[in-house]
Image: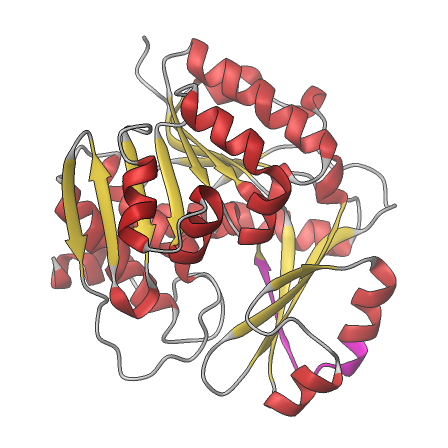
Amino acid sequence: MTEPRYDVIAIGNAVVDVIASCDEELIEELDLNRGGMTLVDEARADELYSAMPPARELSGGSAANTLAGLSTLGLQCAFIGQVADDQLGKVFRHDMRATGIDFDTPARGRDPATGRVLIFVTPDGERTMNTFLGAGQFLPATALDEDLIASGGILYLEGYLWDPEEPRRAMRRAIEVARQAGRKIAFTASESFVIERHGDDFRSMIEDGVIDILFVNESELATLTGEDEFEAGLAAVAGKVPVLVATRSEKGAVAIANGTRAEVAAEPIAKVVDTTGAGDQFAAGFLSGFAKDESLDRCLKRGAIAAAEVISHYGPRPEVDMKALMSEKL
């Protein structure tokens, strides 16, 4: 097995986040799924955009956010995802490359447009997401650079992108390529609704030993296993994946790797401003340690530090020198 060129290569949605603060009344008025993620079509996306208060527009997407965190921590990363040949697509590509991430997947035509996520943030910091996936739903297997995939130490896959058929086929092929090259497969479940739709796939992948590192939050673990009690859910999965990482918001996180268990408390912060990207940055922090063969405890601590930083401000990506912050906190 050759030495990897990249620490992490991710496949995910290429979307632009549109983030606005709002009151609880607007959530009710627009009949939004408070605290969840809802897929919308282009017409609904336009309707919600028109109803939003003044907003910030930032390149996002779950796996892309994780790579942004990893890149700020000094890891070498590459991204595979689909944008359209439009202005948002150009913005997304520029932002990724400016963050130090290689992104060379060719753009497709202008229909559908590049994806966007309309994020409504209530005063308690909870985010309600409405996602128009756009061009991201049409990432074909033919767009994969298989030599690139084989050159990454870890292939990180975003559960959100498992929903549309074309990128699901692309990710299945990417898994084959990565495994043939002897690389690790990391998978984030992303959201309970994804598990409800594709749980049989995910459970089969777990049983077949396809996934090396599985990231879930507490509710996703319950949906995946059918166990409402957290410890029972852990027991149902631990041992079937080499590394299981389960986050619990303010209750911290647990990781189990080959029978060894570690836990970390949530990092204290003055105020939760916006939880957008918390799980993405936790994964970035964890993987930044895992890629360097650090202890399970230290990987979890890195995840907690990264998650705390991102929920202290608006937006899903770090806004401080993460290397310096890790040095200070570890």
In this rendering, is residue 18 above or below 152?
A: below
| x and y percentages locating residue 192 in the rendered image | 54, 52
Q: How many marks?
A: 0
Residue 31 among those drawn in magenta? no
Residue ID at (34%, 46%): 233
| x and y percentages locating residue 96 in the rendered image | 54, 48
Return the residue nearer the eye: 222 or 51.
222
Return the residue nearer the eye: 208 or 301.
208
In this rendering, is residue 252 above or below 75?
A: below
| x and y percentages locating residue 87 in the rendered image | 76, 55
Residue ID at (59%, 27%): 171
Residue 51 among those drawn in magenta? yes
Residue 210 seen by the camera: no
| Magenta region | 49-59
Return the residue nearer the eye: 27 or 152.
27
Q: Image quarter for residue 183?
A: top left
| x and y percentages locating residue 154 in the rendered image | 38, 29
Q: Is residue 295 left or right of residue 225?
A: left
Q: Is residue 300 left or right of residue 171?
A: left
Query: For the N terminus, which image quadrant?
Result: top left
Query: For the C terminus, which image quadrant?
Result: bottom left
Q: How is the image coloured?
A: secondary structure
Residue ID at (40%, 27%): 211
Q: Is residue 5 left or right of residue 298?
A: right
Q: Image quarter for residue 33?
A: bottom right
Residue 31 seen by the camera: yes
